[in-house]
Image: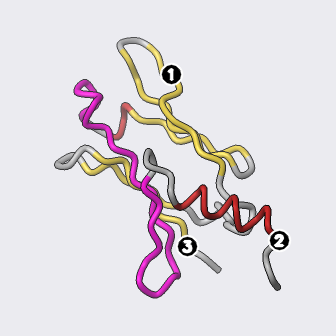
Amino acid sequence: DSLSHDQKHFLDEFFSNRIWHPKLSHDARLLKLSLDLNNQPNIRNQDQIKLIIDQQNIRVEIKNKEDFNIYQEILVPDIIKLDQLKYEFDEKNLYFNIMIPLQ
C-alpha cells in the first residue's frame, strides 16, 4: 500500500507540528503527542483538561476560571486509529501527553 502524494504531504506536515511535537516510538508501535502547557500557569492537574475526539480530530480544552475552552486541536492522519488512545498530564513538566498505539 503506497501513500498518495497528498497523504505523504499531510504526514510530513503532521510530524513537523511544533505545537503537538508528534514522535514515533523506536519500534514505531506508538505515536506520542505532547502538548506543552507551560504557558498556562493555572493548569495544575488533569481535572482541568478535557480531551475530545471527533473522528480524526483531537481537541484539548482547558478550564479557565468557570468553564472549559478550546486550547488546541489537531487533525490526525486517517491511517492512525484513535480507539485505544491513552493520555496523561505530566504535572512536573506541564505537558499533556497522548499515546496512540499503531496497528
What is the crowding at mark 3: few (fewer than 14 residues within 10 Å), some, or many (at least 20)? some
Q: Main secondary structure of the magenta part?
A: loop
Three-letter code, disc 2: Ser
Q: Amino acid at mark 1?
A: Asn
Residue shown at the point (25%, 36%) measured from the top left: 38
Tell me residue 16's x, y (percent). 50, 57
- Measure the C-alpha gap from mark 3 to mark 1: 27 Å
The residue tagged with tag 2: helix, strand or loop? loop
Residue furthest to the left: 92
Question: Circle 1 sits on which residue?
Answer: 69
Depth check, mark 1 against mark 2: the one in front is: 2
Residue under label 2: 4
Compare marks 2 and 3 and give the one earlier in the sequence: 2
Residue 101 image label: 3
Q: Which residues are magenta?
A: 21-44
How far from the left and from the top, in percent, is residue 10? Answer: 69, 58
Neighbor class of circle 1 (other Cα within 10 Å; few <14, some 14-19, many 20+) is few
Q: Where residue 29 appears, x then y in whole percent?
A: 52, 81
Q: Amino acid at mark 3?
A: Pro
